[in-house]
């Protein structure tokens, strides 16, 4: 590609043809302010905060989507530019509710930060076009507040282009424009999969996770409740972000200590249930391979992906594993096996999940997720998982309680649902479920020890990855996809008959897998995702057990309660069905 020379604020820099002014400026240490920009996703210049002067051009140009030209001379910090940016920001603020002190994004709001950066100390114009737009809290996972929307188009681009769902669009025109579902629908009435990627990129609080922290505080103060908590694999490398630790820092010991200080009666690990998932899902795959079941088998751990296939490809639901996600397996086991073993009334057990995901809130409320109620024949046990908190919600609770997270000692999970393996930890990264399943399936099928347990072919941030694993004369073909755009590509190949010789396919709804979930700390971008993935694999490498079937507590669970994978009791508690949706 051709090299071009551009001068930015008096500094010459050589860049490749097609490079934007914004990226060229960064190479010489100049950070042009932006508000709507998302690299490779939303480069539309909608907010016009990133305007610059280009010698020879009469009007300002937007730096985020204007490519450099050879010999171009750019100025980024003139009095006219500073005035233009402040005026544009004042116009945005004129229609924005000044609720910063009570806003959930206070201190982590790009609009607030930009106002400080541009030294905006007064708003000289006023407007109230969006003041009467209603708040939409119709879904289980996310809440829309269109009063706080600045029409940056980020959520639209992520929903349409990254996730290919298209649940929200630009409504109205000009100053009356806002973002929301078409035809004045509520979000719950659309094909929204509640993945929360829109909330992850929103610069303000126009889209946020539904806050359930008060429900947890109430349960913790209720002496009649035995409140237990489970923490998802990905949270062990993300909760630290909320307290200024570098992204990807493993903090599982501190997280356990913090949860005890909040007052939970037992602190357990969703990774235990991830090991259980591998036992069930791996056994299901082996059964399909040996008895002629529907192939390829798709993983079922990601609730956003499940809702996506229910909406867009319901005819292929028989391909999806019947296994519940680790979150839901844990809830069922906690209110049956744990209750029985500890002699606790299952009605009194209150299960809280700490998840990287807003769609997990939706999953917990699915009507079929009440296995414990059926097991005990007790309708008062309404749900297997009572409350789901995102990583962000837990971070807020810890701050509210005044817990000095970075300086806590490392503590261990409680037994019997706290022991896990490295295979379970990597569930948090794209390709992790596949790799964990292969570690166990290989040994169950061949009866041989798998010496090389790191499957690098299914790791990394490539959108779709493939591998072939020989097992007892069968070349097991596997595929991994993350992000629903890639999931759609895989499903279209399945529809076209191109995947007939594949056996197992992992799909995660969110880019990067759960480490990039919609409930994770903000910001979450490609660089942050990679650091979190690296952290996950460091956790795996340090674990004493790295294969799910080696977990001694999982072995005991089957010996004492479940009997064997795919037993009648396992099916009743750990497996489920799916719902075609229009």
Image (tube, rainbow, N blue to C red):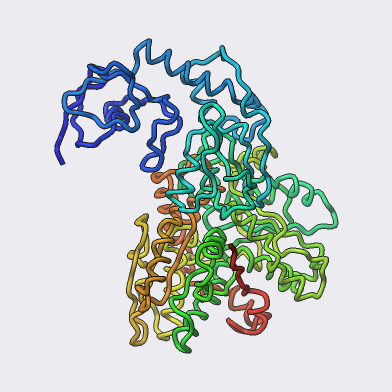
Q: Residue 443: x, y in percent?
A: 43, 81
Left or right: residue 492 versus residue 258 is: left
- Figure check: 1 above or below 304: above
Q: Nearer the viewer, residue 545 or 394?
A: 394
Q: Residue at x 57, y 45 (%)?
A: 182
- Figure check: 113 above or below 164: above
Q: Residue at x 76, y 70 (%)?
A: 339
Q: Residue 347: x, y in percent?
A: 81, 65
Q: Nearer the viewer, residue 60 or 16?
A: 60
Q: Residue 486: x, y in percent?
A: 40, 59
Q: Residue at x 53, y 76 (%)?
A: 318
Q: Residue furthest right?
A: 224
Q: Residue at x 52, y 80 (%)?
A: 284
- Figure check: 297 above or below 262: below
- Indicate the quadrant where residue 453 lies: bottom left
Quadrant location, the C terminus: bottom right
């Amino acid at each position: 590609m051709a090299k071009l020379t551009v001068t930015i604020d008096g500094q010459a820099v050589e860049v490749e043809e097609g490079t934007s002014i914004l990226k060229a400026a960064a190479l010489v240490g100049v950070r042009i302010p932006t508000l709507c920009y998302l690299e490779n996703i939303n480069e539309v210049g909608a907010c016009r905060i990133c305007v610059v002067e280009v010698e020879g051009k009469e009007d300002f140009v937007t730096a985020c989507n204007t490519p450099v030209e050879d010999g171009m001379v750019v100025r980024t910090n003139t009095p006219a530019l500073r005035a233009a940016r402040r005026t544009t920001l004042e116009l945005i603020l004129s229609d924005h509710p000044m609720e910063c002190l009570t806003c959930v994004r206070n201190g982590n709001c790009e609009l607030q930060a930009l106002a400080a950066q541009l030294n905006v100390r007064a708003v000289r114009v006023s407007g109230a076009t969006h003041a009467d737009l209603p708040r939409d809290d119709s879904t289980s996972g996310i809440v829309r507040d269109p009063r706080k929307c600045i029409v940056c188009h980020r959520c639209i681009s992520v929903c349409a282009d990254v996730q290919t769902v298209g649940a929200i669009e630009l409504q109205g025109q000009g100053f009356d424009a806002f973002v929301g579902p078409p035809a004045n629908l509520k979000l719950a009435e659309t094909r929204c999969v509640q993945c929360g990627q829109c909330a992850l990129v929103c610069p303000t609080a126009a889209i946020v996770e539904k806050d359930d922290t008060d429900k947890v505080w109430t349960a913790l103060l209720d002496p009649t409740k035995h409140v237990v908590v489970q923490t998802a694999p990905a949270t062990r490398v993300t909760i630290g972000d909320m307290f200024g630790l570098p992204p990807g820092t493993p903090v599982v010991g501190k997280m356990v200590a913090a949860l005890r200080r909040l007052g939970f009666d037992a602190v357990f690990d969703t990774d235990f249930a991830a090991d259980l998932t591998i036992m069930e899902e791996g056994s299901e795959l082996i059964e399909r391979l040996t008895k002629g079941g529907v192939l390829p088998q798709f993983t079922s751990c990601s609730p956003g992906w499940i809702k996506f296939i229910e909406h867009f490809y319901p005819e292929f639901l028989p391909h999806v594993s019947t296994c519940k996600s680790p979150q839901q397996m844990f809830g069922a086991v906690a209110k049956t096996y744990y209750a029985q073993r500890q002699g606790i009334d299952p009605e009194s057990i209150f299960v809280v999940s700490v998840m990287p995901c807003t769609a997990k809130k939706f999953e917990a409320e699915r009507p079929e997720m009440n296995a414990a109620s059926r097991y005990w024949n007790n309708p008062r046990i309404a749900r297997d998982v009572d409350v789901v908190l995102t990583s962000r919600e837990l971070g807020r609770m810890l701050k509210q309680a005044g817990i000095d997270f970075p300086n806590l000692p490392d503590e261990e999970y409680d037994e019997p649902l706290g022991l896990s393996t490295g295979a379970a930890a990597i569930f948090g990264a794209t390709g992790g479920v596949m790799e964990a399943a292969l570690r166990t399936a290989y040994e169950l099928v061949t009866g041989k020890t798998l010496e090389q347990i790191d499957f690098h072919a299914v790791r990394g941030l490539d959108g779709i990855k493939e591998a072939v694993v020989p097992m007892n004369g069968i070349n097991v073909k596997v595929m991994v996809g993350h992000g629903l755009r890639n999931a759609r590509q895989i499903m279209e190949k399945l529809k076209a008959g191109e995947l007939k010789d594949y056996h197992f396919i992992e799909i995660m709804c969110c880019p990067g897998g759960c480490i990039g979930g919609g409930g994770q700390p903000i910001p979450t971008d490609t660089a942050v995702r990679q650091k979190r993935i690296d952290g996950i694999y460091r956790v795996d490498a340090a674990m004493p057990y790295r294969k799910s079937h080696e977990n001694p507590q999982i072995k005991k669970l089957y010996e004492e309660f479940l009997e064997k994978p795919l037993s009648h009791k396992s099916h009743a508690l750990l497996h489920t069905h799916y719902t075609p949706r229009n």
